[in-house]
Amino acid sequence: MPRTMVRGTNKGNIERGKEKMSFGKNWEDAVERAKKVKLVIFDVHGVLTDNTVIYDDNGNRLRAFCHEDGFGSNALMLCGIEIAIITRKSKTVAARMADIGVKRYYETKEKVAQYEKLLEELNITDEEVCYVGDEVIDLGVMRRVGFAVAPSDAKRQALEAAHWVTEKAGGKGVARELAEMILIAQGKWDAFCEKVTSKGW
């Protein structure tokens, strides 16, 4: 069964999305969940990267990020949706988040504990959170949030836990695709595009 692309006008996407999505996910259900999102939390490795680790001649670990994910993250923030990152300690990831303006960056292995702190800090509920993960370590949060998302190449358990699966694989534009989907669901995408088109980025 073909996947549903998220493109065009809000109305057009909602209409086209009435078919069942890949991985047994339902587009209408995903849209209803996306409408409520006030916070998007991203895992990093396997979501914002493709899990590749490169070492230079000095033994420094390097990771590649997708440029369009920076655009997607900023689109969400400019439209009033909070962004948070929960991952292990990494100078490379910290530098990337600083570069794209993500201030809620947390280095910890205790994902659920940090998630609960965010709920309290932002005074929001589970159903108002979107979490994007790809591995079994993400399941604790994915099974609680109102809108769980996985990249198309995520591990089986993450795919099963997800309410929606992106067409993009990890590190290939997941945040950009998700941003458009959420903003379309919330009726904010067209106004955002108009603003960017007329006033620049």
Image (cartoon, rainbow, N blue to C red):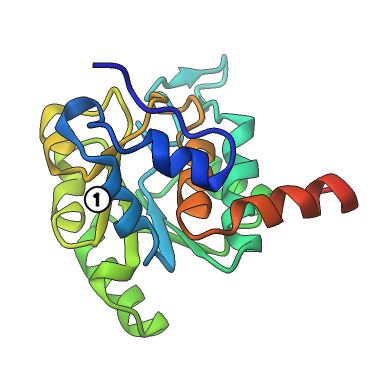
Mark 1 — residue?
29
Q: Position of residue 5 (x, y in %)?
A: 44, 28
Compared across the picture, whether 95 is left or right of 23 comes to: right
Compared across the picture, whether 11 is left or right of 108 comes to: right
- Count of numbered circles on the image: 1
Q: Position of residue 139 (x, y in %)?
A: 15, 48
Where residue 41 sits, quadrant-wise, is: bottom left
Residue 133 shows in this picture = no
Q: Position of residue 179 (x, y in %)?
A: 51, 47
Q: Position of residue 27 (x, y in %)?
A: 29, 41
Q: Residue at x 57, y 29 (%)?
A: 66
Where residue 92 sits, quadrant-wise, is: top right
From the viewer's side, name the closer residue of 168 and 27: 27
Outermost residue on the right side: it is 199
Q: State which quarter of the image contains the N terminus.
A: top left
Compared across the picture, whether 121 is left or right of 138 comes to: right
**Helix, strand or loop at mark 1:** helix
The amino acid beneath tag 1 is Asp
Q: Residue at x 36, y 85 (%)?
A: 123
Q: Residues within 10 Å of mark 1 (few under 14, many from 20)?
A: few
Q: Residue at x 31, y 77 (%)?
A: 119
Where residue 158 sits, quadrant-wise, is: top left
